[in-house]
Image (spheres, helix red, strand yellow):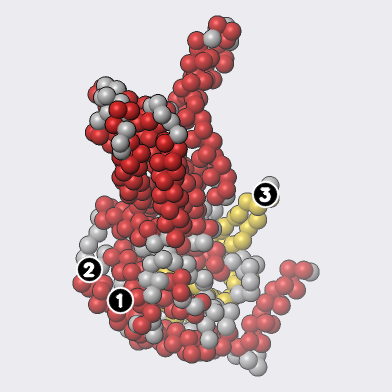
Amino acid sequence: MRGGKMSNIFLIARITFKECIRNRALYGIFLLGLLLFTANIIITAMFSWELGKVAVDVGLSVVSFSGLIIIFFLSINALSNDLDRKTIYMILSRPINRSQYILGKYTGLGLIILLSSAILGICAALSFKLATAGHEAFIPMHFSWPVFFLALTYLSLSLLVLLAISFLWVSITTHPFTAVLLSMLSYFIGQNVENVKNMIIKNQMFEDNVLLIKVTDFISWVFPNLAAFDLKTTAAYGLPVNASYLFAVAAYGLSYIGICLILTMMIFQRRELA
Amino acid sequence: MRAIQFDNIWKDFKIGMKRTTVLHGLSLDINSGEIFGFLGPNGAGKSTAIKLLLNFIKPTRGTITLEELIVGQDPFQHLIGYSAETPCFYENLTGRETLLFAGKASGMGRGAVQERAEDVLRRLDLLAAGSWPIKTYSKGMKQRLGLAVALVHEPRIYVLDEPMSGLDPLGRRLITDVIFELREKGKTVFFSSHILSDVERLCDRIGVLNKGELLYCGEVDVFSRNAATFEDAFINLIEGHERGKNV
């Protein structure tokens, strides 16, 4: 006999990963990614200046774009389908509790995102190599591959944060479409919240509007600051990396994932699976 | 010994602004080793009772126990094998992979579950299809796989929601034989069905539910004693209850 919480989480992660990796839609996303990398080589050729910067920017943006599609259209569906089509009955009629189910599902889908980032990240590196081949003079002087892969890692972490938020939305809403919309909205706010906050706080026009400043501050806490994970510019120019900043962002991301998953589990415990 | 006990179960659902009661104080005892049929027309509350039994939903009032374990408080899932009315699986997995998952999740070791999965696939005539993705299965094959998932870890109690639904006569015969085998092994089977002839043939006792109220609970023979057929007895009971409600 075997048992244990971890092995249950691992079992669910494994079937989730297998189910997703055999989904044809995933191959469609990979194909789209590869097409965009080809486009990267063509687009980059149009820029005589900053060739390296554009190649890195476009390459990492394609990885991010593909990850977003996986979250919005594959991951949310995978979780919602379990609830709508009652596949979850097969799982929860076993000695597996609802929290283990959520953690297992998140691990499985998280692994899909990491795998996608790894494959497309290598493609991004190759497309950078091809785009800049013969134009070495246009590669930024301090460009380094470790920083490039560091940017890829933080991009993947931001996708994992968004995946955790999408889990929370699926647990709150009853319709997958609503969960997709709310996840997209969270991404949009997350990408811009820091800029908007700075704009409002630094603008003299809003100096006396305490309520607006407080609301903006609150929103910046509730929604994830996804822009903080964006190291594309750092990677493209090979700028120096601040270790304490990286540590703080990683801790922030992991905490955010933890909080979202705890809330999801709490809501899911109470949910009626009728 | 009692295998399953529903003790004064009430269940309300909120539909829009309205509260609807779908189970009215259901009390039911199912003994160990018996085959118990749960009957009732559509919307009677059978599936709701089964979902409560499996802790998918929570009762508004009342307690359900499985061999002294309280549903919703104690871990009880190791005791049961469950097959849904329309079993849904991960369609890209194979039948064999699904059974391996089900067995391991129920605490079986890898070697034991592999051996048992082959036995169950063979018994349910799915051995050749075991390595196919489930998306290629017919409705009947999925129904049989649903039963295989319930059987794989050899629990003491089986909860089968409409196990004959969507099956051809051969498939129905197969499921009937499997249920008889479970009785021979001393297992408890609690199943809901619309197919009265199967219920009459298979069950030791039955419970008849209509509009969330238990109208009869007892021996099959006693149920049909004052009617020409089992079906007549069932229809008379439901119609009598409906008339009483409408008066």
Distance, label 3 to label 2, CA atoms, is 47 Å
Q: Chain of mark 1?
A: B
Quadrant where the C terminus of chain A lies?
A: bottom right
User: Which residue occupies the foreground of this view, B99 or A70?
Assistant: A70
User: How dense is the environment of label 1, judged by Cα within 10 Å: few (below 14), some, or many (20 and up)?
Assistant: many
Q: Amino acid at mark 3?
A: Gly
Q: Residue at x 32, y 48 (%)?
A: A119
Q: Is residue A251 visible?
A: no
Badge 2 or badge 1: first in the primary sequence: 2
Q: Residue at x 57, y 10 (%)?
A: A206
Query: Which residue was labeled with disc 1?
Result: B117
Query: Which residue was labeled with disc 3?
Result: B16
User: Which residue occupies the foreground of this view, A51 or B130?
Assistant: A51
Residue B110's disc number: 2
Asked whether disc 3 touches disc 2, contact meaning CB atoms under 8 Å apart, the reply is no
Badge 3 or badge 2: first in the primary sequence: 3
Mark 3: secondary structure: loop
Same chain letter for marks 2 and 1: yes
